[in-house]
Image: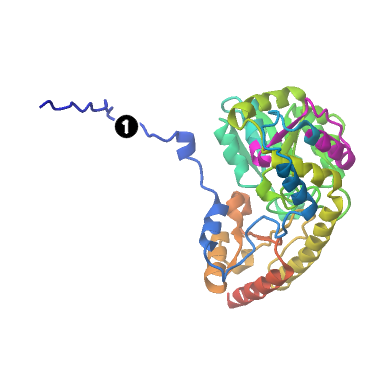
Amino acid sequence: MSTALVTQPEVSSERRSRVASRVANLKPSGIRRFFDLVLGRPEILSLGVGEPDYSTPWAIREQGIFSLEKGHTSYTSNQGYLPFRQSIARWLEREMGVSYNPETEILVTVGVSEALDLAFRAMLEAEDEVLIPEPCFVSYPALVELAGGVPVSVPTHSLTGFVPTLEDLERRCSPRTRAILFNFPGNPTGATIEPSAMRKLADWIIRKDLILLSDEIYSPLTYEGKHTSFASLPGLKDRTILLHGLSKAWAMTGWRIGYAAGPSDILAAMTKIHQYQIMCAGITGQMAGMEALDHGDEDCRRMVEDYARRRRFIVKSLNEMGLPCHLPGGAFYAFPSIRESGLSSEEFALRLLEEQDVAVVPGDAFGDSGEGHVRCSYATSLEVISQAMGRMKRFVDSL
């Protein structure tokens, strides 16, 4: 009877990790941690989730259902279903005042997150730097790192409306700086930016020869005046990657439909990666998206009006309980200061959850500049917001 030999691997003195260092060293999402604490606890009043409490409007859902009934279940072009890209081009020209060729300058992606990932991987060489104003959405620095780049935070403050100053940008710009990322209206602050400030930033970007990634997914949720896209400013279209999608304004988070619009050379490079990584976004979501962009303005308007009422109530409540909060110009987030409590952002959020069953996200989850704040989403009913504000007041009074 023979005995099989078991080959042992050659082991070096220092065993190599099976996880890539850039992934192992990646900081976990601070948002996900607090979401996990809330799961399975129905007694919690959550102001943590940045997701509309509405279902997708019926007319949009109906188009998705109808597309399935007609047997539209195939792949689309890597760039996306051409009629949908044409709808995107029409919407961008109508709402943003920017004209794009749907055949060469628009790419449909699986949410804006994929579009950002593609953009960074398409244009960054190793150690290239990307300026990112903070507080910012948690995935921005992580996606830069995963693409081999270096995220460089630019702190912003409530006194400047969470808009970066030219002085702060200049201090953090270096010969390695390749791009800058803006998000207006912003997550987590709800910040918007005045056209005069936009023009100054645009001139600086052109002078520094940078590429601008402009995440404008919250643009339809602008409460005062009309949103202006960076891509519409003189000299910026050819150096701007405009990022947008259907998740927020049309309550289509689960459909996972986003897109990028920009210069054809960069879009071609992004598409090259996309065709290997994803192939194409789901056709059902794209066909429903045509209805959203072509005929969904009224549904969007009604939701925005409701968010505006919630915005006024939550900001008034926070200020009255002694948590200073600027009035957000867009999106559906309030970002009050909790410094007077004497607690750190994480301590405040954990104790509020434990003592009053209210979930908010600590500000430092969005970068060091967010410390001293918490994010409160008002993408939930006025009744829930009212109850949560009552509980939060009791907590603040107890301090």
Instruction: Provide residue 40's location: percent of width, then percent of height.
Output: 52, 64
**On-image quarter of the C terminus:** bottom right
Q: Magenta span has 110? A: yes
Instruction: Provide residue 43's location: percent of width, then percent of height.
Output: 56, 71
Instruction: Determine which quarter of the picture holds residue 108.
Output: top right
> Does residue 345 sit above or below 382 in this rendering?
above
Instruction: Provide residue 230's location: percent of width, then percent of height.
Output: 81, 38
**Residue range of the region highlighted in magenta in the rendering:** 85-114
> Does residue 5 sit above or below 349 in this rendering?
above
- The residue depicted at 78 percent of the width and 25 percent of the height is 104
Instruction: Provide residue 37's location: percent of width, then percent of height.
Output: 51, 61
**On-image quarter of the N terminus:** top left
Q: Magenta span has 262? A: no
Q: Which residue is mark 1?
A: 15
Instruction: Determine which quarter of the picture holds residue 268.
Output: top right
Mark 1 element type? loop
Closest to the observer: 195 or 91? 91
Question: The disc labelled 1 sits on which kind of residue?
Answer: Arg
- The residue depicted at 80 percent of the width and 52 percent of the height is 59
Residue 76 is left or right of residue 306, and the answer is left
